[in-house]
Image: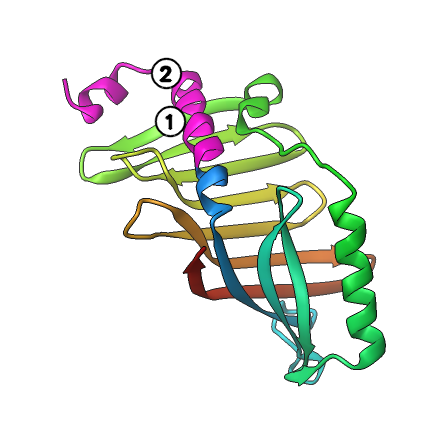
Amino acid sequence: MTIKMIVLILSALEILQLVAGAEEGQRELRARYTYREVQENWRLDPYGRPIAESHRTKGFEVLMVNGQRYRKLLERNGKPLNAAEQWEVEHDMNRVQEQKQEAKSLRNLARTHALSLRGGGDEPYVLSARSEGESHEIRLDSKDFGILRQETISSKGTRMVLEFVRQSDGVYLPLRVEVEFQVGDVRGLQVSKFSNFTAN
């Protein structure tokens, strides 16, 4: 029996458990990688368009610290950090090394969200999870249940889209993250792009 045939007879809940298991394995595999993140930030005008004058950038190295992913700030607006900023980054890394955070599991969605499943055949599977406060739409690779794209929308007006790319060794790494948010009367857009993936 092929994976596609198995999926046809599985419920959305069972697919969620498979995806959660695959994602937990992916976290361990991602720990072998470091990569580069370039983050761009804008304020948005009342029509949702980026305001050019508000454009800001940050550059990070993404690595593992104390078993968790850490974004080490390297530059702001294309310029290296000054001595004081570098000290702050090193101090923050030392603080993270002394802490341990438990990773969140997708399995928790089953307790608080209504699940549904669509797609199949030549199309990616799409798992939806909805509650009063937020909705998730997760696009899956039908071969190994890896996450290709995840979109989350909250009732507070925040929208986040994560896109992943599959490496030759089967690891799914972040390719792009887009977050649109609102704080008071201020609307903002944050876009991160990832590159320079290096296996350690």
Q: Which residue is mark 1?
A: 117
Q: Is residue 21 magenta?
A: yes
- Lower position in the chain sequence, tag 2 or tag 1: 2
Count the marks: 2
Residue 147: x and y in percent read: 40, 41
The residue lying at 79 percent from left, 82 percent from top is 82
- Give the answer, above or below, for where 136 lies relative to 52: above
Task: Decide whether the magenta segment is chiefly helix, strand or loop.
Answer: helix
Q: Amino acid at mark 2?
A: Ser
Give left or right: position of 148 versus 123: right
Mark 2 touches mark 1? (CB < 8 Å): yes
Query: Mark 1 belongs to which amino acid?
Result: Leu
Q: Is residue 185 visible to us here?
A: no
SS at mark 1 in the image: strand
- State the residue at coordinates (69%, 56%): 181
* Left or right placement of residue 64 versus residue 32 in this view: right
Which residue is more in the foreground, 105 or 170? 170
Q: Quadrant of the N terminus?
A: top left
In percent of width and height, residue 94 lies at 78, 54
Helix or strand or loop: what does disc 2 sit on?
A: loop
Marks 2/1: CA–CA distance? 8 Å
Residue 17 drawn above or below residue 77: above
Q: Position of residue 20 (x, y in %)?
A: 47, 28
Residue 135 in view: yes
Q: Nearer the viewer, residue 155 or 66?
A: 66
> Of the numbered discs in the image, which one, if any, rests on residue 11?
2
Front residue (pair 194, 7) = 194
Label 2 Cα crowd, 10 Å radius (few <14 / some 14-19 / many 20+): few
